[in-house]
Every structure is written in C-alpha cells, then in structure tokens.
Image: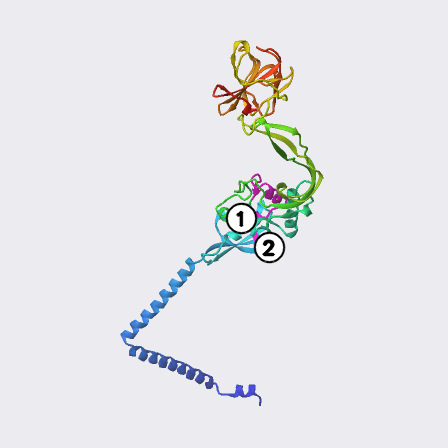
C-alpha cells in the first residue's frame, strides 16, 4: 500500500489533536519568555537604569555633533577639467566661475566643471586651477624666467630671433652669443602666461612698449574678477631688452700716427716764444681691432695687431728762453772793432764829456745787440743821436746804439744777444759815419768796454 493510501485510511481526529497540541506549545513558550523577562526587569536597580540611560544619551548627542561638524566642514566646489584633463577645484562662486569661463573663451580652452560638496584643506591653492594651467617651456635668463612658450621649438625660435635682432650690423646671428646664462625649463603655468613666438620676441626686445594679453595678471586677480582678455602693460619701464647679446668682431682700420714735437731752446727768442723750424708730418698704421658689442652697440675695443705703414716726422720748434735780462758774457755790437773815439773827456768842439765809444764802420754795417734785453726806444732822437735804439738789459743796465741809418726792431720787443737790431749810419750830430755805443747803469753812463 502506498503512502497516499495509508494517509487516507488514518483516523480523522489525528489532525485536530495535532493542531491543538501545537497551539498549546506556542502559548507555553510565550508565557515562559514573558515570565523570564519580567523577573529580569524586577531585578534591575534604579541606579543601573539611570546610568544606562545617560550613556545612551551621550552616545546619541556625540554622534549628532560629529555629523553636524562633518556637514559644516564641507562646502560647495567645482571640479575643473581643461581640454578634458582634470586640473583641480575652484570655489563654487559666481565671480570665480565667470572669470575662469572668460579666461577659457579668451584663450580657446575647452573647460568643463562639475559640482562637488567636499572638505578642502585651508592650504589648498585653488588659484592654480583657476588659471587653467598648461604645460609650457620657460625661457630662463640668469636663473629667472623671461617668457613662457608652448614648447621647445617655440622657445628655440624666440632665442634665435632675439640673437638676430640684437646682433651688430653685418654680423651673422651664429657669431653672437647671449651675455648671460640661457636655459629652457619645462614648467606648468596659467594659459594666460603662454606667449606666441612673435609676442615673446617683441616683449624681450621692447618691454616698456609692448602690451601683453594676460601676462602680469595674477591668479588672485582672476579670482577677484579681473578680465583676462584685457591687454595689460607689464610693470617694467626700462627700454633696455630683457636679454643681452654680445659679440667680438675683429675689424681692420687705417689710423694716423701723431707726430712728436722737439723743442730746441733759443736765446734768440723771448721766453715762452715758440717758432716752428720744421713742420711735423703724421704717420700711418694699420690696426686689427677686436670690438666688443652688446645688443648691437660697441662697448669696448682692444688692438690685437698693428703694422706701421709710414713713420711720423717730428716737428722741430725753437723755444725762446730770453726773458729780456742780460746774462753771461757780452759781445761787440759791430763786426768792426776800431774805436775812433773812447769813453771820457775829449777836446772836440772846445771840450766835452763823451758818454760812450765810437766804432768806425761804413754806412749800412749790421748792428747787433750786445746782450739780452727789451727795446725801450727805436727811432729818431732829437738830442743828437739821430736814429737810435735804447735797450733795457735788466738789473739797471741800459745799452744805447746811435747814429744809425735805420733800426729794424721796435719798442717793447725782446731781443737776444747777437740779434740784428739795425744798420750803422751818420745821422744826428756826427762828423762821419760810425756807430756810437753807450752803456748806462741806473741812468749814468759808464765805461762801455766791459760790456762789449
């Protein structure tokens, strides 16, 4: 007999009895649990109950405080994606967001932003993200960045064009070099600071006259709402280029060699008087000169080789040392030495004092100064001397030359010993042609022979 047949033959009261037994068992379990819980509750003291309640409240309020603090420590930010690359976060502020959008439009950057509510440290520099940073190449000069370009090729082009612009005329750019240390350095800067080669060259050459788009705008200014598309003049006011180029150029030139002057002392001339006897002639030489140029302008030169093409001829000049005062020995005033009438008393015309000596000589005989002096009088004398010359020889000494046919010096002229001063004659009170020579000391005639 199968299972289904046996089940049909079972008595009908068995299911009912099983149900009743099951209900009674469930009620018994509930009563036992309730009775146990009640007995445990009755054993709990009030003190333990209060303590448990206090701990529960503390846990509740502590969790609430931490939740509120977490909420207050976070704020609204925006994730910034520049040309699909995440560059950082900026505050979710209308002015900051607008400035970044204007910057993106001005520099053709595809910018996307995503809202985020997060906790950000106070030291986070969000201005870098606001400037839409890009990789660039800095042109460094003496350790400092001068301009930023997009890549190495642009930076190299800028350096070549600057060298060419600042090279001296006629000198190839390959023959010049920068005066300072130049380097190219990869970096990350705001897109506003990256310049085209044309703009970079203009800025380096003419910093005070070049306006730059974006350069000089700080990220803080962008955050404060500065318009990055507006042209801003750089702070530099100096016209000198920001980089210096130098070159050493060797040139050949022909230059004059100055002549020297050789002075020959002459007692025939008044002291300080110069009389050229032979004019000088300059010489010529060829020089190889190394010229140092900085930014196309010569700043120094050095002669590295020279060849004399023509030697100079010195000039010869007489330098007068005659100060108008007699010095040394005296000389005869005439080439003739025959004294026809001495100094002193003579019986001529009934007797008279002869203040000098008479030297017999024909008319036209040259007359020379017996020593240095200054001519005081030269010309006609109405006191019987005829044409005469009176010379002040210094130290109270005067010499007189009378009865001349004509003098050849003038008053105020400095004469030297042996200088031609006139020609003998027979003018004035004479009985025949001769030279009257007279010496006076402090105005009184003396024996003239010691002074001739």
Quadrant for the N terminus in the image: bottom right
**Residue 5 covered by magenta stretch:** no
Q: Residue 168, percent across and down? A: 66, 41
Location of residue 402 by image quarter:
top right
- Mark 1 packing: few (<14 Cα in 10 Å), some, or many (20+)? many
Near-viewer residue (216 or 256)? 256
Which residue in the structure is indicated by mark 1?
A: 100
- Mark 2 packing: few (<14 Cα in 10 Å), some, or many (20+)? some
Secondary structure type for disc 2: strand
- For this view, does 257 lie left or right of residue 21? right
The outermost residue toward the left is 46
- For this view, does 25 lie left or right of residue 430? left
Which numbered disc flags the more N-terminal residue, 1 or 2? 1
Near-viewer residue (414 or 87)? 414
Q: Residue 162, percent across and down? A: 64, 45
What residue appears at the point 50 percent right and 53 percent down from the top-left corner?
126
In the picture, the disc for residue 431 is: none
Which residue in the structure is indicated by mark 2?
A: 186
Highlighted range, magenta: 187-213
The outermost residue toward the bottom is 1
Measure the C-alpha gap from mark 1 to mark 2: 24 Å
Q: Measured along the vertical axis of the image, is residue 414 above or below residue 55?
A: above
Location of residue 262 by image quarter:
top right
- For this view, does 426 lie left or right of residue 45? right
Q: Residue 144, percent across and down? A: 55, 51
Near-viewer residue (23 or 132)? 132
Quadrant for the C terminus in the image: top right
Secondary structure type for disc 1: helix
In this orientation, does residue 411 appear?
Answer: no
Q: Measured along the vertical axis of the image, is residue 187 above or below residue 399?
A: below
Q: Residue 375, percent across and down? A: 55, 20
Near-viewer residue (389 or 351)? 351
């Amino acid at each position: 007999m199968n299972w289904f047949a046996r089940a049909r033959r079972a008595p009908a009261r068995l299911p009912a009895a099983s149900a009743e037994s099951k209900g009674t068992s469930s009620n018994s379990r509930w009563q036992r649990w309730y009775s146990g819980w009640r007995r445990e509750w009755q054993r709990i003291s009030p003190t333990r109950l209060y303590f448990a309640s206090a701990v529960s409240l503390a846990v509740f309020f502590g969790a609430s405080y931490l939740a509120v603090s977490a909420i207050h420590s976070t704020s609204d930010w925006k994730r910034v994606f520049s040309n699909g690359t995440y560059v950082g976060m900026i505050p979710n502020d209308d002015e900051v967001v607008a400035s970044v959008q204007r910057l993106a439009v001005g520099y053709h950057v595809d910018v996307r932003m995503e809202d985020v509510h997060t906790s950000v440290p106070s030291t986070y520099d969000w201005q870098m993200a606001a400037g839409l940073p890009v990789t660039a190449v800095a042109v460094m000069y003496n350790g400092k960045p001068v301009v930023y370009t997009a890549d190495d090729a642009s930076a190299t082009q800028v350096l070549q064009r600057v060298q060419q612009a600042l090279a001296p005329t006629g000198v190839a750019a390959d023959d010049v070099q920068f005066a300072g240390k130049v380097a190219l350095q990869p970096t990350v800067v705001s897109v506003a600071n990256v310049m085209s080669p044309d703009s970079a060259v203009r800025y380096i050459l003419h910093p005070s006259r070049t306006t730059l788009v974006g350069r000089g705008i700080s990220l803080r200014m962008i955050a404060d709402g500065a318009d990055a598309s507006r042209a801003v003049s750089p702070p530099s006011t100096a016209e000198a280029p920001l980089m210096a180029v130098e070159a050493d150029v060797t040139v050949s030139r022909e230059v004059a060699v100055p002549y020297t002057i050789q002075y020959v002392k002459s007692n025939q001339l008044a002291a300080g008087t110069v009389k050229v006897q032979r004019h000088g002639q300059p010489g010529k030489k060829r020089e190889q000169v190394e010229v140092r140029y900085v930014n196309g302008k010569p700043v120094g030169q050095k002669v590295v080789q020279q060849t004399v093409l023509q030697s100079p001829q010195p000039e010869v000049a007489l330098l007068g040392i005659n100060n108008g005062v007699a010095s040394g020995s005296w000389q005869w005033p005439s080439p003739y030495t025959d004294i026809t009438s001495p100094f002193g008393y003579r019986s001529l015309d009934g007797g008279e004092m002869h203040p000098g000596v008479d030297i017999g000589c024909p008319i036209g005989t040259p007359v020379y100064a017996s020593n240095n002096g200054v001519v005081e009088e030269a010309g006609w004398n109405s006191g019987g001397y005829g044409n005469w010359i009176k010379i002040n020889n210094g130290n109270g000494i005067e010499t007189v030359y009378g009865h001349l046919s004509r003098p050849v010096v003038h008053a105020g002229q400095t004469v030297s010993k042996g200088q031609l001063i006139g020609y003998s004659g027979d003018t004035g009170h004479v009985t025949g042609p001769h030279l009257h020579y007279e010496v006076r000391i402090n105005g009184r005639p003396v024996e003239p022979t010691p002074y001739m």
